[in-house]
Every structure is written in structure tokens, then in C-alpha cells.
Image (cartoon, rainbow, N blue to C red):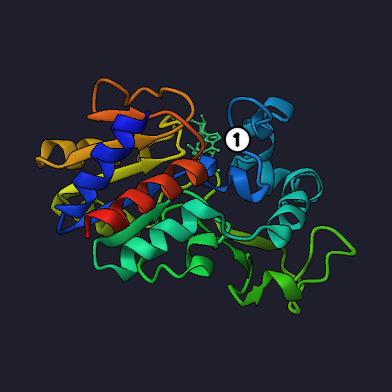
Amino acid sequence: MFDLIEKAAADLASAKNVVALTGAGISVESGIPPFRGKGGIWEKIDPMEYAHIDSFLQDPEKVWRVLIKGMKDVIDQARPNAAHLGLARLEALGILKTVITQNVDGLHQDAGNTDVIEFHGNFAWQKCMDCSRRYATRSVDMSRLPPRCRCGGILRPECVFFGEPIPTHHLYRSQDAAEHCDVMLVIGTSAWVQPAASIPLISKQSGARVIEINPEPTPLTHHISDYLIKGPAGEVTHRIMEKLAKLR
Ligand code: OAD
């Protein structure tokens, strides 16, 4: 692991355009559980029953009660960890250009990253399904579920449910960023969910080096990623940043 940390620091030090693709694992050390694997949300509830747009349309009260309200409580408590802060520092150093995240927790922006493509939306906002009026999630009264707009319509998070397309501008911007980077950092994603899981392939085919940080191997490991640094995102990123500081 130590060799790989030095290698990653050297790769980042010589890179001109780094892009990060992040998933739920980067926020685990901030107290937000992942979806898959140990302690994952989808171990407890079936995503097709609670996170598919058809399930939401059929029974919004159930999805709000079981999934969405709980997410709000967890995200409210979360603060950026060493991995988010490391990526913000990489941007400040002029090395990292864009973060593409599958997360809806807003922690990359809280850490200080300014170009964040929120591939699956952002939980900070709710939208009326009838009139499209938007509300900050923190201002929404959740004493009665589902919460409603002043027009009476049901509110939904501005997040992508299964069965919904990725907003086209997010998809295109992500593809463009992936195509033009020279190093892609893939942090804390199981790489099971498409189309996000294909983004590292675009970088690889364009000649970029792909570095994974994850305690577990993924379908990208040994196929698309050049190397995997096994470990928790916060700890690994912190060590890479320490090494990088000595190289600059
Ligand atoms: P997953 O929950 O599928 O995968 C989390 C990954 O994080 C796994 O590969 C873990 O090994 C890894 N992991 C766990 N702890 C970690 C740590 N401390 N540091 C680094 N990595 C760690 O999350 P995503 O790949 O983000 O979509 O899931 C993709 C999408 O599936 C989500 O955006 C969500 C979900 O269903 C929608 O809801 C549309």
C-alpha cells in the first residue's frame, strides 16, 4: 500500500488535468452508510421497492417514511472527511479540475470543490411534482409525509430515482471531463450502477491513468483501473496528500 501511495502522489504531481469520480464509499467516514456491501442500505431494504420512480409514484408516503426521511437525518449530521478535504486541496493546487459524484450529500461542495457534477442529483433540494416549485430540504416540514408544496402537490428530492434518466447536461459534461483528463481518481464506488460505472472506461480509452481507492476490489479493478489502493478513502487520501506535499 505504501508504494502505491507514493505512486499515486507522483502520478498526481505530474498530472495537468485530474478528474475524480466518487461514490458512497467516500462519505462512509462522514457517517453516511453505503448502498451495497457491509452495512449497506440495500441490505436492509429492496432498492426496487423503495428507490424506483414507479414505487415512489405508487406510494410516496412509504418511500418518504422508509428511505428519504432517514437519508435527511443522516445527511444533516454529516461533515466532509479527509477524502473530501483532500480533493478540495487538490483543486486549490490546480491539479484537480472536476469532481463527478454519484452522491447527493453535497459534501464535496462543503469541503470546497467548485466544479462538482452531481450525477444523481442533490438532496439539498425538493421539487413539487405538480408545479415544479423548489424548496430547500432543510425548510421542508416533514411532520406529515409526504411533504407537500403550497399548491398541494407532492414534493420529491431532486435526485435521480432508479428508472429515471441522468440529466443530459450532467451526462455530457461528465463524458467530456472523463475524456480530457490525464488521471482519473475513482474513489468509493462499487461501479455497479450505469451509466456512472462506464465513466472510468472513457478516461482509460482516452489514455488517462485510472487510480482506484476502495477497501474492496470492484469490476474495474485489474481491467480498467491501473491500480487499486486498498483502504478507506479518508485515510488513503490523507496519506497521498502528505506525500504530494513533499514532491511539490
Ligand atoms: P455503493 O454502495 O454501491 O458502493 C460503495 C463502495 O464504497 C463499495 O465499493 C465499498 O467497497 C466502498 N467503500 C466502503 N467503505 C469505504 C471507505 N471508507 N472508503 C472508500 N470506499 C469505501 O455506492 P455507489 O457505487 O456510489 O444510486 O452506488 C452507486 C449508486 O447506487 C448510488 O448513487 C445510488 C445507488 O443505488 C441511486 O440511488 C440512483
- What residue is at 74 percent from the left and 28 percent from the top? 44
Vertical placement of residue 146 versus 60, above or below: below
- Quarter of the image where one finds residue 177: bottom left
Q: Quadrant of the C terminus?
A: bottom left
Residue 18: % across, % down: 23, 54
Q: Quadrant of the N terminus?
A: top left
Q: Are there few (<14), some (14-19), or many (20+) residues within 10 Å of tag 1?
A: some
Callout 1: SS: loop
Q: Is residue 195 left or right of residue 11?
A: right
Q: Nearer the viewer, residue 35 or 226?
A: 226
Q: Nearer the viewer, residue 117 or 169?
A: 117
Whether ligand 1 has any atom under 8 Å from the Cβ at mark 1 is answered as: yes
The amino acid type, in three-letter code, at marker 1 is Phe
- The answer to whether residue 168 shows anywhere in this view is no
Q: Is residue 127 left or right of residue 82?
A: right
Q: Is residue 191 left or right of residue 143?
A: left
Vertical placement of residue 174 versus 128, above or below: above
Q: Nearer the viewer, residue 14 or 121?
A: 14
Residue 33: % across, % down: 66, 40
Q: Residue furthest left?
A: 207
Residue 169: % across, % down: 31, 62
Residue 91: % across, % down: 32, 65
Q: Residue furthest right?
A: 143
- What residue is at 29 percent from the left and 53 percent from the top? 244
Vertical placement of residue 53 versus 118, above or below: above
- Quarter of the image where one finds residue 106: bottom right
Q: Mark 1 = which residue?
A: 35
Q: Nearer the viewer, residue 57 or 68?
A: 68
- What residue is at 31 percent from the left and 58 percent from the top? 245
- The answer to whether residue 130 shows anywhere in this view is yes
**Total number of numbered discs in the rendering:** 1
